[in-house]
Image (tube, coloured by chain):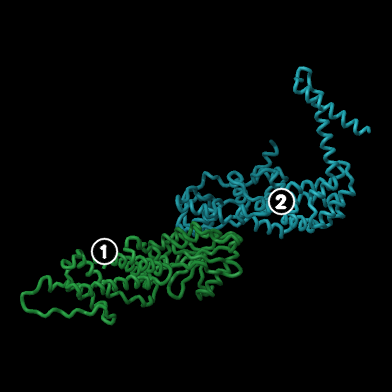
Chain colours: A cyan, B green
């Protein structure tokens, strides 16, 4: 409980019950510069436009007053569509002006509840949230604290941080991609996150082979675009190669496989995995399953064993015996 | 901030350049996402708009979609308010091309299409939205021999020169009127024959209708005064001839260039009315003359 008390903001956010519903002039509203949402897909905007054109604005936007004008808190798409349709007025909940931190947190929380934003856009605003929270709390908030305040799960924050570690050019590339209609997107946030995780692991365990993350990114992205890497899950296999020592696999083979992956055009992660650690992981997998089965069998009571189970156990003994005989020869 | 997403925003400079090269409108005169200057109450803010030298408002909507939903509102409003606005959709060029039903829809609504690749290419011209509301003349309601002329006139009105479209209908009316005059002369369908005056009189000189140098106005007026529908067994022809005389005055004034946007708006309203009333008149004239 103590930690929860500590999390409460010093400056309380404006009370939503103080909001007043008004019709305000569309041209008197300004975009909120702190809005973490950067991606507005044309297709979705046009769908909304069609709906507003037919039925009008059904849900008021939220704004706060700033002098003679208003600043958006929630409803940028509705506002843009209203402008496009040359509507003179729009229904809006006018709230008291929030602090800079509350302004940001409110937007995060509104959207975390209602719809999922692109993670990259969340990531790009996180440093500012951290900075403002640090100023308010007097210390840098940890992940759980940050997650609670912005209203998104911890796992998202971790993934967002991975995206933030990418150089700017890759973030721009991803942002441009996210602006395309979903069916036209070739690169996704998941791709960059999986790739970044894998590269990080490889660089940590084999720093001499991957001295520069940037080169590895370039090569892997290129292979993904060409289809040499055809599955996002393959990047997890790359991390497994880097952790060859965990399954007592030949580390030299693993290093050679990673080098080839970064040098040869047609060499895929699957090729590298099969040539280095596939057998070791298979062996570990079989062992883990046998151990699990043995544990389970030991827990069986005689009354639990019906004819079907007995039949399977006999087949198991036979297969195990044949394998042992084969190995002895 | 614009309504356009990132990739579409990149098309803006190319389309602006198109305004310059094709329509001679300088970049300074191009307005981005503002209410229509000609009528600020129209429920649309096109991506780009500018006024051309002939007082038309040129609008371009940039979109991925060859027929974006916002175009509908613009078309309807401009049609209803008789606004001289030419509207285009500019889409990025890709390998897929434009689906035929989309092109048909654009065509029906008089909206042009521009493909934006390395440069801009107009693949369908736009017509002034104030003219698009013109009623379909329904060629099937005419006898076979008139259908081609009516269809040609309609196509010319919509996709070529509207004044010329009106003229084509009027030419057909003139031709039929002249033929009626020749036939009346041949058959003696005249008022002085049906109801000869009691006092001695000299029958009026019948204008030689087959001579193109004799003015249409003279022939129409003569028919209005002297044609007798009872003898010709053409009931209702008298009233139709009154309407024929009424078109004579403005038949040839299509070439006057409007000098202000208001004059252009008025001119378009007149052209629409003249075309529609011309088509109705031709239909009634054909019907009354019983396949002359």
Looking at the figure, which quarter contains the C terminus of chain A?
Answer: top right
- Nearer the observer, A326 or A97: A326
Mark nearer the viewer, 1 or 2: 1
Callout 1: SS: helix
Question: Relative to residue B289, is residue A261 depicted above or below?
Answer: above
Q: Residue furthest top?
A: A303
Q: Give the chain letter at badge 2.
A: A
Q: Residues within 10 Å of mark 1 (few under 14, many from 20)?
A: some
Q: Picture coordinates of residue A230 (x, y %)?
A: 73, 50
Question: Relative to residue A301, is residue A7 depicted above or below?
Answer: below
Q: Residue furthest front?
A: B186
**Label 1, label 2: how far apart the Cα atoms are:** 73 Å
Q: Residues within 10 Å of mark 2 (few under 14, many from 20)?
A: some
- Nearer the observer, A196 or A101: A196
- Nearer the observer, A215 or B222: B222
Question: Relative to residue A49, is residue B57 depicted above or below?
Answer: below
Question: Which quadrant would residue B115 be assigned to in this image?
Answer: bottom right
Reading the image, the residue beneath label 2 is A191
Q: Is residue B97 left or right of residue B177?
A: right
Reading the image, the residue beneath label 1 is B287
Q: Residue furthest bottom?
A: B213
Q: Give the chain letter at badge 1.
A: B
Q: Picture coordinates of residue B123 (x, y %)?
A: 52, 67
Q: Picture coordinates of residue A114 (x, y %)?
A: 58, 45
Callout 2: SS: helix
Q: Is residue B271 left or right of residue A154?
A: left
Question: Which quadrant would residue B223 be assigned to in this image?
Answer: bottom left
Residue A179 visible in image: yes
Question: Which quadrant would residue B98 be assigned to in this image?
Answer: bottom right
């Amino acid at each position: 409980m103590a930690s929860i008390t500590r999390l409460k903001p010093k400056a309380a956010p404006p009370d939503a019950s103080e909001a007043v519903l008004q019709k305000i002039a569309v041209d008197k509203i300004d975009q909120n510069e702190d809005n973490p949402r950067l991606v507005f897909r044309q297709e979705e905007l046009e769908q909304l436009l069609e709906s507003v054109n037919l039925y009008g604005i059904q849900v008021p936007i939220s704004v706060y007053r700033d002098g003679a004008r208003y600043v958006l808190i929630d409803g940028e798409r509705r506002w843009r569509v209203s402008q496009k349709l040359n509507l003179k007025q729009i229904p809006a909940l006018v709230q008291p002006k929030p602090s800079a931190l509350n302004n940001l947190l409110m937007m995060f929380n509104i959207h975390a509840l209602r719809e999922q934003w692109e993670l990259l856009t969340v990531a790009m605003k996180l440093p500012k949230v951290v900075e403002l929270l640090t100023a308010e709390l007097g210390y840098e908030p940890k992940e759980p604290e940050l997650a609670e305040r912005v209203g998104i799960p911890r796992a998202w924050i971790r993934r967002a941080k991975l995206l933030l570690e990418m150089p700017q050019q890759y973030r721009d590339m991803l942002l441009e991609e996210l602006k395309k209609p979903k069916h036209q997107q070739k690169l996704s946030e998941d791709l960059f996150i999986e790739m970044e995780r894998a590269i990080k692991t490889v660089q940590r365990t084999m720093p001499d082979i991957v001295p520069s993350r940037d080169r590895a990114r370039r090569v892997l992205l290129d292979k993904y675009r060409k289809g040499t890497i055809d599955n996002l899950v393959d990047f997890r296999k790359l991390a497994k190669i880097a952790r060859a020592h965990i399954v007592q696999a030949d580390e030299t083979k693993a290093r050679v496989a990673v080098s080839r992956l970064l040098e040869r055009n047609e060499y895929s992660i699957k090729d590298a995995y099969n040539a280095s650690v596939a057998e070791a992981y298979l062996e570990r997998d079989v062992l883990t399953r046998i151990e699990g089965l043995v544990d389970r069998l030991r827990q069986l009571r005689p009354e639990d064993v019906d004819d079907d189970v007995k039949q399977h156990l006999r087949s198991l003994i036979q297969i195990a015996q044949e394998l042992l005989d084969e190995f002895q020869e | 901030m614009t309504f356009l997403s990132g990739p579409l925003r990149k098309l803006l400079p190319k389309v602006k350049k198109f305004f310059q090269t094709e329509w001679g409108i300088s970049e300074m005169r191009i307005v981005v996402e503002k209410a229509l200057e000609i009528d600020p109450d129209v429920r649309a803010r096109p991506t780009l708009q500018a006024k051309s030298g002939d007082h038309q408002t040129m609008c371009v909507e940039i979109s991925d979609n060859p027929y974006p939903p916002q175009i509908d509102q613009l078309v309807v409003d401009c049609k209803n308010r008789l606004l001289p606005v030419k509207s285009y959709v500019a889409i990025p060029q890709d390998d897929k091309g434009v689906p035929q039903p989309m092109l048909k829809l654009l065509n029906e609504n008089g909206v042009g299409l521009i493909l934006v690749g390395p440069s801009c290419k107009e693949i369908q011209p736009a017509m002034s939205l104030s003219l698009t509301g013109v009623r379909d003349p329904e060629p099937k309601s005419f006898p076979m021999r008139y259908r081609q002329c009516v269809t040609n006139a309609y196509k010319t009105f919509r996709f070529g020169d509207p004044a010329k479209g009106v003229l084509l209908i009027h030419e057909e009316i003139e031709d039929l009127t002249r033929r009626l005059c020749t036939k009346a002369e041949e058959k003696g369908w005249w008022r002085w024959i049906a109801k000869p005056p009691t006092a001695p009189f000299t029958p009026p000189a019948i204008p030689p209708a087959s001579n193109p140098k004799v003015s249409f106005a003279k022939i129409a007026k003569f028919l209005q005064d002297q044609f007798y529908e009872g003898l010709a067994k053409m009931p209702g022809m008298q009233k139709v001839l009154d309407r024929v005389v009424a078109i004579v005055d403005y038949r040839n004034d299509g070439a006057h260039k409007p000098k202000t946007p208001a004059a252009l708006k008025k001119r378009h309203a007149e052209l629409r009315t003249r075309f529609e009333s011309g088509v109705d008149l031709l239909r009634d004239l054909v019907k009354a003359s019983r396949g002359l």
